[in-house]
Image: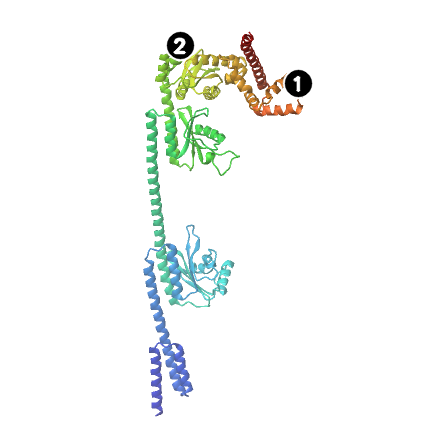
């Protein structure tokens, strides 16, 4: 019975153990079975047999669990391998790898380091860090490459791990790494190389915050993941490189298409400008075409800086910067951007945008410049278009010069006939002028230029081109160049001729001018006045200067044929006369008393029977009317002469009035 009972109890115990094993019961259930047997006072032999059965069953359960875990890990590796075939970028790929590594070995932290283009390994991706230092390239465990566990991996040629990193003395420790490991609370650390053949692309690290020994099976799980990651990393790198190359090719293609479109646009714009030149267009038309193509304001200037054509009025143009850029442009033979001066706002460009200066040249001859003010920066293609615009302007100027030379004899003959006295067939002269596009009924001035040395031929060629460009006439008489030009300001015309001709010849040019006139009959008279003006300047030592009859003041009054006394008085003291007439004041009388007293306000006040302060205030008012320099020698002489002429004219007027009323009065008395 005892044997039977024992055998029966043993069978029951074995059956209970098998039932628990079949149910995949946790270890606690096996422990409960043993506890009940002990409480029941089972014999020692039965207890030993039961304990042996429980031990074997627990081992079988653990083996099954490990096998199941390994199967799950293999499935996870297979899933990872499938996922790694997807077209991840490098960052996304490495995030997937560290996530899988954490799950495979139940790690607290995982990260990957890769070698950069300079061979330095840097932390590329991490997961599970608490302090955020895991993303630092000098943090844990990126700095372990040559020291620490990374160095041990390279020494062993395979995976390496430590149960407790901070206490492991198999490798040198770096203070920075130890600090991060301590801050993260890590103890066990594992490192597996990402290997392709004999090349190691990087390291896959795992960390745990408890002391832990990594079994060979765990290393065997992580090594294939690292190998897969290495292959996928290389593919991702090649894919990124390919994408970058494709992107660069697309950018190159886009830039090429843009450049081609721009070149076509430049070609079309140049074609429009050339059509204008060849069809007889003027400078303004070419300037407008260039301005439309460049979306900019364009000025065409001659060598003297005078504007020949403009598509608008530039605002805040820095003339000093433009002048410097003009010199640089002619020296380099290409457009130059005008830089603002040292006192200018560094954030602003001349003219409110970018200002460029392009040389207008024909061979070695300077024909002027193009000044372009653009609201937006000019590209390289825009600079090329600016060069083409300058070439078009140069061609137009040369064509105008050729036309002027071809028509020169006809135009010279017309001006010679206008200068002749008396004129022959005035109606025919007017018709000839109209055929040449000249309306002598509109205001015109006459300019006489005499080069002071050098060859006259170059000056004559220039004069032909200049007269044609300005819509006037030119001839040569007595060694002087005579120009009949449209306009009303003789002084400005004289200065413009001097400013352009003198630099061209490289020596002084004396220029006299007169006008304006409004008929063909006035041309000869203006020529005589301009020549007398030129002779007067030479006699006064003013050779090389430019002036008109009006600029010579009372001398101009004497040199003028019409002796415009009224005009002279008006220019000298007109504002004072008008002030007296409007306000019934005595400024004119005060001036006469002031000069009569030798320039003494006190003596003038006695003569006028007023207080000296009154004279001082009147003189201040006169200064406001005539300008601050009215008492300088040149102007004060003209003021005194004008006062005498005005006084004489008033006396003569009163005498004429007296003579006209005297006989009538006498007849009335009779």
Instruction: Please report the residue visible at 48 percent of the width from the left and 37 percent of the height from the top.
Output: 348
Q: Secondary structure at mark 1?
A: helix
Q: Any mark on residue 607, and which?
A: 1
| First in residue order: circle 1 vs circle 2 | 2
Judge by depth and name the residue closer to the eye, 655 or 17: 655
Image position, residue 483 (x, y; %):
43, 16
Q: Is residue 273 left or right of residue 636?
A: left
- Could you say which is closer to the camera, residue 389 or residue 293? 293
Residue 352 at x, y = what percent?
A: 46, 36
- Front-most of residues 442 and 486: 442
Q: Residue furthest front?
A: 670
Identify the residue at image location x=34%, y=61%: 80
Percent position of residue 9, x then y: 35, 87
Residue 274 percent coordinates (x, y): 34, 28
> For the residues carrying marks 1 and 2, which lies nearer the camera in this image?
1
- Would residue 397 be visible to someone looking at this image? yes
Residue 112: quarter of image: bottom left
Q: Considering the image in quadrants, where does the C terminus appear?
A: top right
As drawn, 394 above or below 263:
above
Separation of residues labelled 1 and 2 (CA atoms):
56 Å
- Name the residue tied to disc 2: 423
Q: Residues within 10 Å of mark 1 (few under 14, many from 20)?
A: some
Residue farthest toward the top in the current orientation of the protein: 670
* Residue 544 makes an appearance in the image: no
């Amino acid at each position: 019975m005892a044997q039977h009972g024992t055998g029966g109890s043993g069978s029951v115990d074995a059956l209970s153990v098998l039932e628990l094993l079949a149910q995949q019961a946790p270890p606690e259930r096996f422990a409960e079975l043993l506890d009940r047997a002990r409480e029941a006072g089972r014999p020692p032999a039965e207890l030993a047999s039961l304990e042996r059965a429980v031990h074997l069953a627990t081992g079988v359960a653990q083996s099954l669990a490990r096998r199941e875990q390994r199967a799950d890990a293999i499935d996870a590796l297979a899933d990872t391998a499938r996922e790694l075939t997807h077209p991840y970028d490098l960052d996304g790929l490495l995030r997937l790898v560290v996530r899988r590594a954490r799950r495979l070995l139940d790690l607290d932290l995982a990260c990957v380091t890769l070698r950069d283009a300079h061979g330095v390994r840097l932390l590329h991706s991490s997961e599970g860090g608490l302090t955020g230092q895991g993303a630092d390239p000098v943090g844990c465990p990126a700095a372990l490459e040559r020291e620490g566990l990374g160095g041990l991996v390279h020494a062993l040629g395979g995976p390496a791990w430590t149960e407790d990193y901070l206490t492991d003395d198999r490798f040198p420790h770096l203070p920075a790494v130890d600090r991060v490991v301590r801050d993260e609370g890590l103890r066990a650390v594992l490192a597996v190389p990402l290997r392709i053949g004999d090349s190691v692309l990087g390291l896959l690290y795992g960390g745990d915050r408890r002391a832990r020994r990594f079994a060979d099976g765990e290393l065997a799980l992580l090594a294939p993941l690292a190998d897969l990651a290495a292959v996928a990393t290389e593919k991702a790198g090649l894919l990124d490189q390919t994408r970058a190359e494709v992107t660069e090719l697309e950018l190159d293609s886009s830039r090429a298409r843009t450049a081609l479109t721009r070149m076509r646009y430049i070609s079309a714009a140049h074609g429009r400008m050339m059509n204008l030149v060849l069809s007889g267009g003027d400078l303004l038309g070419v300037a407008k075409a260039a301005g439309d193509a460049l979306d900019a304001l364009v000025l065409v200037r001659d060598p003297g800086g005078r504007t020949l054509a403009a598509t608008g009025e530039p605002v805040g143009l820095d003339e000093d910067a433009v002048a410097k850029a003009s010199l640089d442009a002619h020296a380099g033979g290409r457009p130059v951007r005008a830089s603002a001066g040292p006192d200018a706002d560094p954030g602003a460009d001349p003219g409110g945008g970018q200002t460029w200066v392009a040389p207008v040249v024909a061979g070695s001859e300077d024909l002027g410049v193009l000044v372009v003010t653009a609201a937006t920066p000019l590209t390289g293609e825009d600079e090329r278009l600016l060069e083409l615009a300058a070439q078009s302007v140069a061609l137009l100027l040369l064509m105008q010069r050729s036309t002027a030379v071809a028509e020169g004899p006809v135009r010279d003959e017309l001006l010679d006939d206008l200068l002749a006295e008396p004129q022959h067939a005035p109606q025919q002269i007017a018709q000839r002028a109209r055929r040449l596009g000249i309306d002598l009924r509109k205001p015109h001035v006459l300019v006489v230029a005499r080069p002071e040395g050098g060859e006259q031929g170059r000056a004559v060629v220039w004069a032909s081109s200049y007269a044609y460009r300005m819509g006037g006439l030119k001839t040569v008489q007595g060694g002087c160049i005579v120009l009949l030009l449209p306009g009303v300001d003789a002084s400005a015309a004289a200065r413009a001729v001097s400013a352009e001709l003198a630099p061209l010849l490289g020596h002084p040019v004396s220029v006299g001018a007169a006008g304006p006139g409004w008929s063909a009959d006035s041309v000869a008279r203006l020529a005589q006045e301009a020549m007398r003006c030129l002779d007067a300047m030479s006699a006064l030592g003013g050779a090389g200067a430019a002036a008109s009859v009006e600029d010579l003041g009372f001398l101009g009054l004497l040199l003028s044929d019409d002796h415009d006394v009224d005009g002279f008085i008006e220019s000298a003291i007109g504002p004072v006369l008008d002030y007296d007439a409007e306000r019934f004041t005595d400024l004119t009388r005060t001036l006469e008393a002031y000069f009569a007293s030798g320039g003494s306000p006190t003596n003038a006040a006695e003569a006028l029977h007023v207080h000296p302060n009154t004279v001082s205030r009147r003189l201040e008012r006169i200064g406001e009317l005539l300008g601050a320099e009215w008492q300088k020698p040149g102007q004060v002489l003209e003021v005194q002469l004008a006062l005498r002429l005005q006084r004489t004219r008033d006396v003569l007027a009163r005498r004429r009035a007296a003579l006209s009323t005297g006989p009538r009065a006498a007849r009335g008395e009779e």
